[in-house]
Amino acid sequence: NEGELLELAQTLDLASNMSAFVVLDLYPSANAYRGIVDQVNDKQIPYPNDWFLATNGGSGGLNDLLQRGDGSEAAQYGSDYVHYISQGNVVQGQYMVLGFTANHNPNYTSSETVTHYLNNISIGSAEINVYNPLGAGSPDMIIGARGPIGTPCCYLDGAIAELLLYDTTLNTSNITAVYNYLQAKYSLPYTAPTVSITSPTNGATFVAPATVTINATATAFSNSNPSVTFY
């Protein structure tokens, strides 16, 4: 809720590979930024992680973002605190499973690979140059807002049922297992698949006799594999 957060002492060091998944319901809010899990210094630079939602001005929805860094403003291969912007808007008004995986390999120029997930479906991924995230001695962790400690802001304005943090990059089967566990535990609503015809285009005309091929795509925010059958 607005003005409510949970602060944890320096007990978690998630400075390398990591994954995070949360069951949450978002309330209507005027906040442009809404913190989920946050560790930043007094300049609001990630040290090492800043996971939050941001208003998508173009669509009016929300995007899922992650920043990682070492608390420094110096750049090595580029900016060491970088937005990873998902391609899908976050649904408001119902419980959902939101999460990400982050793989850090300092041996590569594009050292960080982050993938966002909504209800077990990838909604965006990016590879980018980032300084080595550092967790030892980092600030306390804030859940439900953004820092820095002592002057929090950007409250989540929502309800968190469960938060899972892992010090590894989960693979596809692990992510599906996490989602199935959370869906069963909280009886999360099933979102019906959506179907769209990709060809022929709307309004296309044909002269008989003609053979018309119809193509369609189906998308489901669940662990199912939808298919389309024409009758």
Image (cartoon, rainbow, N blue to C red):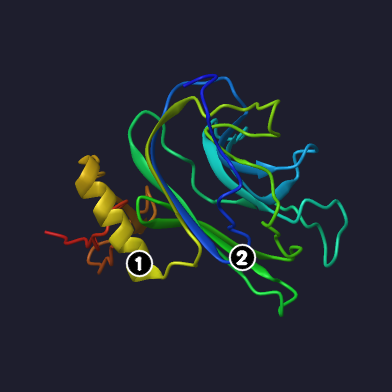
Left or right: residue 140 versus residue 217 is right
Can you give x and y, in whole percent of width and height, for residue 228 in the image? Answer: 21, 60
Can you give x and y, in whole percent of width and height, for residue 17 in the image? Answer: 56, 66
Left or right: residue 130 versus residue 34 is right
> Relative to 25, is 68 above or below?
below
Indicate which disc, 1 or 2, sits on the residue closer to the N terminus: 2
Q: Is residue 216 visible?
A: no
Q: Real-space Cα distance between discs 1 and 2? A: 18 Å
For residue 16, the mark is 2
Residue at image coords 11%, 59%: 231
Viewer-proximal residue, 197 or 133? 133
Viewer-proximal residue, 93 or 75? 75
Q: Quadrant of residue 209?
A: bottom left
Local packing at callout 1 (Cα closer than 10 Å; few below 14, some 14-19, many 20+) is: few
> Relative to 188, is 152 above or below?
above
Local packing at callout 2 (Cα closer than 10 Å; few below 14, some 14-19, many 20+) is: many
Can you give x and y, in whole percent of width and height, for residue 21 in the image? Answer: 42, 50
Q: Amino acid at mark 2?
A: Ser
Q: Is residue 59 visible?
A: yes
Can you give x and y, in whole percent of width and height, for residue 75 in the image? Answer: 86, 60
For residue 174, the mark is 1
Viewer-proximal residue, 207 or 146? 146
> Relative to 44, is 71 above or below?
below
Residue at image coords 33%, 36%: 95
